[in-house]
Structures are given as structure tokens and as C-alpha cells.
Amino acid sequence: MTCFVTVGTTLFEDLINKVLSEESLNNLKKIGVKKIRLQIGKGNFESEVVDRVFKGVTSDEGYTRVEGLEIDYYRFKPSISEDMAEAFIVIGHAGAGTCLEVLALHLPFITVTNDKLMDNHQAELAVQLSDEGYLLHCTPSSLGETIVKEDLFSLRQFSAPSKKFVAEHIKQLVGIKNVQ
């Protein structure tokens, strides 16, 4: 079972490093994860992670085995949809696109917000979706304990609004009247 981790196009080194902490790796194994695939964006691994996990060698993409887990990573791909669809669980930033895509797949989802950013709109979205029971929300420092929360596997299923409803709402907003 795969855990897919994504930071999107941002620099979010705290997330990619914290998910590879001993606590997070042990807790991912406890919930049945056998493989971790990381989309690391512009970020870099801390030297401790490079030494402990990757035996001192990293590049723009790579693979290793550590503590009984397969770990692979890459910076960017044209689409990460396939990686999400193949995952057992997703851990990622709280970008609107990422949230909607993961929620539509009905996967257990932990959003990790960057608590170092000011005016972080992603935190607002993550907190709201968490309050409504669709995902779990944490910061990098609490990721390890969030992974083993029982709520992770009993989250509400997200239902996207119908396309017709959205189209009608947009028409109303721009002042287009329905013609009968």
C-alpha cells in the first residue's frame, strides 16, 4: 500500500523532511503502508534525512529502501493524478486543486499546512475541510501523531456539486437569464 506525498509547485521542505522522520515512517508502517512516493517540488532534504534515508546521495529523482519501506521521489511531473489514484493514503499541502482531486478519489487525506507562512490561505481551506470531517489537518510538527489518528479511516465522503448546478450558479452571477 502506497502513501503519496505532494507539495505541489511550492517549496515545503518541512513536509518532505517530516514525512521521512523516524516517527512518521514508523507510524506509516503501523497503518499498513509499504511504499512512499514523494513529489518534492523545489524542496531539498535535510542533511540528516539524506544520510539516514538516502545514504548520502540525492538528485532530482531517486529510490531507496529504509526501515522496511520502499521510498521513491521526484520533483515534478506533468500530472500527479495517477500517483494519487494508486495511493492508499495521501499526505499533502492544502492547495485547492490537490484537495479537490484527493477528495474526489475518496482517499484518506492528511493536509499539512506550512505554519511558517503568513496569510496562509491554504490553512483556511484545510481547517474548514477538516472541521467538516473530509480530511485531517496538521502542521509538520504534528504529522507523526496525525498519521495514526483513528479518524483517518472514517472521514466523510466528498460529493462534488453537479456540473449543471455550477453552470446555473455562474449564469446567475453574471446575469444570464434562462430562456424557456
Image (cartoon, helix red, strand yellow):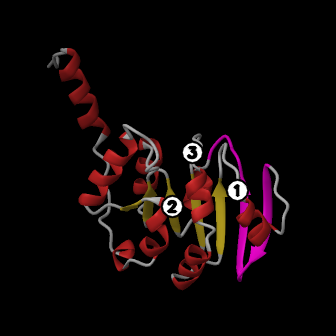
Q: Which residue is mark 3?
A: 8
Q: Earlier in the sequence, mark 3 or mark 2?
A: 3
The picture places residue 158, in percent across and down from the top left corner, at: 32, 57
Left or right: 129 in relation to 43: left
Does 84 appear in magenta? no
Task: Tell me where residue 145 appears, x and y as whole percent.
Answer: 44, 75
Element on which disc 3 rests: loop
Q: Residue at x 39, y 41 (%)?
A: 120
The C terminus lies in quadrant: top left
Three-letter residue code for mark 3: Gly
Q: Report the residue marked by disc 2.
A: 91
The numbered dot on residue 45 is 1
Q: Quadrant of the N terminus?
A: bottom right
- Packing grade of label 2 (10 A; few <14, some 14-19, many >=20) is many
Taking the image as drawn, is residue 86 in sight? Answer: no
The answer to which image quadrant residue 129 occupies is bottom left
- In percent of width and height, residue 177 lies at 16, 16
Mark 1 falls on what kind of element?
A: loop
- The residue lying at 55 percent from left, 59 percent from top is 85
* Frontmost residue, 100 versus 123: 123
- Dominant secondary-structure state across the stretch colored magenta: strand
Q: CA distance from mark 1 to mark 3?
A: 16 Å
Q: Quadrant of residue 79?
A: top right
* Mark 1 / mark 3, whichever is N-terminal: 3
| On screen, residue 132 above or below 115 | below
Return the x and y of residue 97 as percentages of the image width and height.
45, 42
Q: Measuring 53% from the left and 85% from the top, which residue is drawn there?
A: 30
Q: Are marks 3 and 2 in contact (CB under 8 Å)?
A: no
State the extent of the magenta-drawn residues as a range. 60-79
Q: Which amino acid lies under the numbered mark 1 shown in the image of this protein?
A: Phe
The reply, left or right, for residue 81 in relation to residue 175 is right
